Amino acid sequence: MDTSDELLLDIQHLHTAFRVHDHFYDAVDDVSLTLHKNEILALVGESGSGKSTLATSIIGLHNPRNTKVTGDIMYNELNLVGLSEALFNRIRGNDIGMIFQDPLSALNPLMRIGDQIAETLVYHTKLSEKEREARVLELLDQVGIPDPPLTAHQYPHELSGGMRQRVMIAIAIACKPPIIIADEPTTALDVTIQAQILDLLEDIQKEIGSGILLITHDLGVVAETADTVAVMYSGQIVEQGTVYQVFENPLHPYTRSLLRSMPQADSDDEELHVIQGTVPSLVNMERSGDRFAPRIPWIPESAHEANPVLHEAEPGHLVRCTCYKTFYFPDEKPEAAAAGAAGNNVQNPSEGA
Amino acid sequence: MWKTILRRVILMIPQIIVLSLFVFILAKMMPGDPFTGLITPQTSPAQIARLRKEAGLDNPWYVQYVDWIGRALHGDFGMSYQMQRPVTSIIGERAINTLYLSILSVVLTYLIGIPLGVAAGRYEGTWIDTSIQFYNFISMSTPGFVVYMLAIALFGFALGWFPTSGSISVNASGVIGTIGSRIYHIILPSLLIAILGNASIVQYLRSGIVDNKLEDYVKTARSKGVPERVVFNRHILRNSLLPIAAFFGNVITGLLSGSVFAETIFAYPGMGKLFIDSVSGRDYSIMTALILLYGILTLLGNLLSDIIMSIVDPRIRID
């Protein structure tokens, strides 16, 4: 990515709160992010960290009765927060394309593939029915469907998982949207198909120059495809930077724990690192202090900030809370860890054991 | 698809044979025979024995069964013990009456049930939904005959708006007069059947809509920028109508079997009333013919449901 690329999406202090028993709880808590043309921004985190909620806030798919979205999502001088449904319907599909996790449930079982792709075109273009049909075939071809005329007449259940996800991508890119949101696009697929779908996404991005918000919990996918990374925990961004910065020099304890939890091909006798505890639920979440602190109990409370904020550790590399400076894993010596925070990598589990 | 339908129809043959055997055994186990109604104190035992022999009642059971089946295939179910008329023609008359009543009640059931189901599902959790749920709760838990009798007392006798019994007025004449009189006689019972019997349609539709609203493909449709009205009609509603469509096969079965309670209480000469009368009057020949007919209708209804499902749901293909 080139930072001089045109700014597409400027999210500032976004809060998305869900109503639970007549109280609103922030699932996305003060998130600020930017997405540029030609950028692939990966949003990483465990289930329940708020990454999908952030995505659906951008595209305005929350039920307004149970959700409160505040803050700003600026797209071309237009604030998507609080936008009317009629206006939002002109943005959705046309300016923002969305790809969902499970392509089988994300396609209407009763509609032919061609009709489902054409539906986007109906509401955003002035194409005639003939032209729409031609465009559908063109799109199917673009996403690598071997026999577009056949597939256009098929139903979702007649296709394989990988083919369905290609159809989903065709739907998302039908109007060449500047922004594509891909919510775990490869999670429901075989590993071999995953690689194909990611390649396809990258190709399409190069072709139409979109900015892609890639939501995933798969760090391998991030390393392979993303330009920039934002790590989310409990609704907040805890670390943010370029892929190079975050993978080469992970700072936040959560990022380091995630990287340490990845299986390594070169170590076969090691037990996988497990992050203690679970992501707190929306209602039970502790909202003061470092939200990740309960999962690294060996770190003294004094190491955390009372109200952790994002610090710029190096240009463009943000990290929340100062605890990263003294963080160490229980099987490491604190001195070594302090050195680790300064720059050496902690991804190699054999080092600590 | 035609091949599959043919295969299914052929597969129904053994089922019908088993059913007919049950019906035959049932009939044999019952006391009395076709001559019970003919016997008078003057009839001599020798005469009865001769009649029985002529009718083949002394033959082994399997010969009798084959004879019975052979006649049934020609539409001959024997004579009604009580009415001394061919069973087939009695059932024929009643079937027409029931058909009129059933068609109107089915149409009314869907006309009332579908809008209520759509409203309850669409406005889930609001007072609209709560009122419809409450109405269904009442309609499900109130026995039909109570409402029928109250309605006859109120609209039939007290207000005099509708006839209280029969299928046609005695002095109806002319084509329009006859049809008008028939419709006039079935309005009240079919309306009541529809008001009391729409709970399954309303509930199927409501829960289908409530479930489908949360489906991912609905999110996909919204993310395409499809207006909410179209999302509801094209995506949510169409998927929610599947169980209703499947249900329709059995509804058609019901067209001929009739409503036992409504017909009896409204003294409407239909199949339901005929069945009750034949049971209470021990008219076994009618009873067995009706049981056989209901059995075959149920099998056909199931087949029809499968065919309808395969037409409306592309995931189901019967070939």
Image: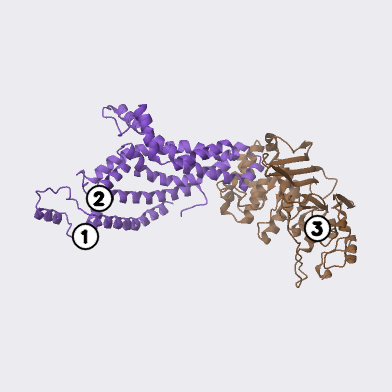
- Residue count near mark 2 (Cα–Cα under 10 Å), binned few <14, some 14–19, many ≥20: many
Binning the other alpha carbons within 10 Å of mark 1 as few (below 14), some (14 to 19) or many (20 upward) gives: few
Residue at mark 1: B63
Q: Is residue A317 depicted above or below B197 in this figure? A: below
Q: Residue at x 86, y 55 (%)?
A: A304
Please, is residue A272 above or below residue B28 in the view? below
Q: Up-down: is B169 above or below A185?
A: above
- Report the residue that reaches farthest toward the bottom: A269
B208 left or right of B306 in image: right
Residue labelled with disc 3: A255
Chain label for disc 2: B
Q: Which of the 4 quarters of the picture holds residue B178?
A: top left
Q: Nearer the viewer, mark 3 or mark 2?
A: 2
- Tell whether label 2 touches label 1 (CB within 8 Å): no
Q: Colour of chain A?
A: brown
Question: Which amino acid, by three-letter code, is at mark 3?
Answer: Thr
Q: Amino acid at mark 2?
A: Tyr
| Inter-mark Cα distance, 3 to 2 | 82 Å
Q: Along the line of sight, which residue is nearer the eye, B22 or B161?
A: B161
Q: State which tag comes first along the sequence, 1 or 2.
A: 1
Q: Marks 2 and 3: in contact by CB < 8 Å?
A: no
Local crowd size for mark 3, using a 10 Å CA cut-off: few (<14), some (14–19), many (≥20): many
**What kind of element bears circle 1?**
helix
Between disc 1 and disc 3, the foreground one is: 3
Residue found at x 52% / y 51%:
B315
Q: Position of residue A162 (x, y in %)?
A: 64, 56
Subunit of mark 1?
A: B
Q: Position of residue A25 (x, y in %)?
A: 73, 45
Task: Find residue B284 and name its label.
Answer: 2
Q: Find residue A109 and report its horizontal and vertical position in percent.
A: 56, 48
